[in-house]
Amino acid sequence: MENLGLLKTLALSGGTWVLYFLIACSVLSLAVIFERCVYFWRQRGHDQRLQDQVLASLSNGHWDHAVAYADEAKTPVARTFLAGLAQETAGIPVRERAMENQVLTERIAAERNLVILGTLGNNAPFIGLFGTVLGIIKAFNDLGIGGTAGPKLVMAGISEALIATAVGLMVAIPAVIAYNLFLRLIKIQVARMENASRLLITGVENMPGRGALTHGR
């Protein structure tokens, strides 16, 4: 019975506290979106130019130049190149594993906090609906208590309750859009790193003077 009393108290409290919770979720969502935008902005670079520079250096036998170009770029593709160029005498299998690990590391970094956007995008409308249900319960309870003044009171209460659903959608829509956009950027970034890995392996194999050395270990 005590538990039922607590549930009734919660139900009759209305959905105001849900609105405050949704506002906090909105602030969190916007903070994550801003942080991820800054991250992807910092990762931008001229990957095609870097790729051409690294491969041209390798084809000319200038290993140090290729490393210098990759180290200067500071992008995910550049760090993938660096992972493959880390050991000059390493064999192809070693380079492939090093670059695969780097791609995984970059992907984990790019996906940081995206679970928050995914969770809010999927659940904020339901949280808003929960607030609306609580508001309607309170409105009908007020109708039962208010007597003849009840209808106007309950209509006002229902109107206020529907605000929670609207706020839930306002939180969810930007979160879903940003989540899908960031996933698209990550997919493109991973594709570029994987392509860079394959090109680097080919460049090292064809580098003058490498020969059988590249296939060892």
Image (cartoon, rainbow, N blue to C red):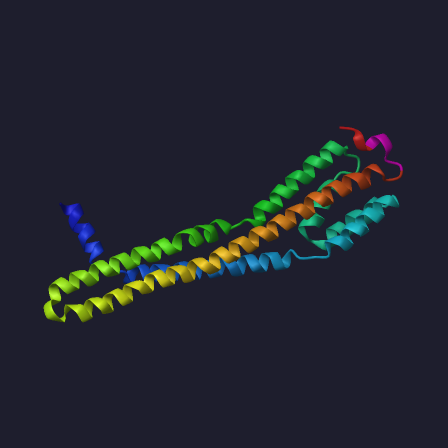
- Please provide percent x and percent y for residue 106: 62, 46
For the residue pair 108 and 145, the one nearer the viewer reads as 145
Looking at this view, is 127 or 202 the one in front?
127
- Residue 180 in the image: x percent, y percent? 53, 53
Residue 75 position, x and y percent, is 68, 53
- The residue positioned 52% from the left and 54% from the top of the image is 179
- Tell me, yes or no, if residue 14 can be seen here: no
Whether residue 116 sits left or right of residue 209 in the image: it is: left
- Do we see residue 155 in this rendering? yes
Residue range highlighted in magenta:
209-213
Is residue 118 left or right of 206 when viewed as pictured? left
> Which of the pair 3/81 is nearer the observer?
3
Residue at point 73%, 36% (across, down): 95
Quarter of the rendering occupied by the C terminus: top right
Locate residue 200, reporting x and y percent: 77, 42
Give the mark count. Answer: 0
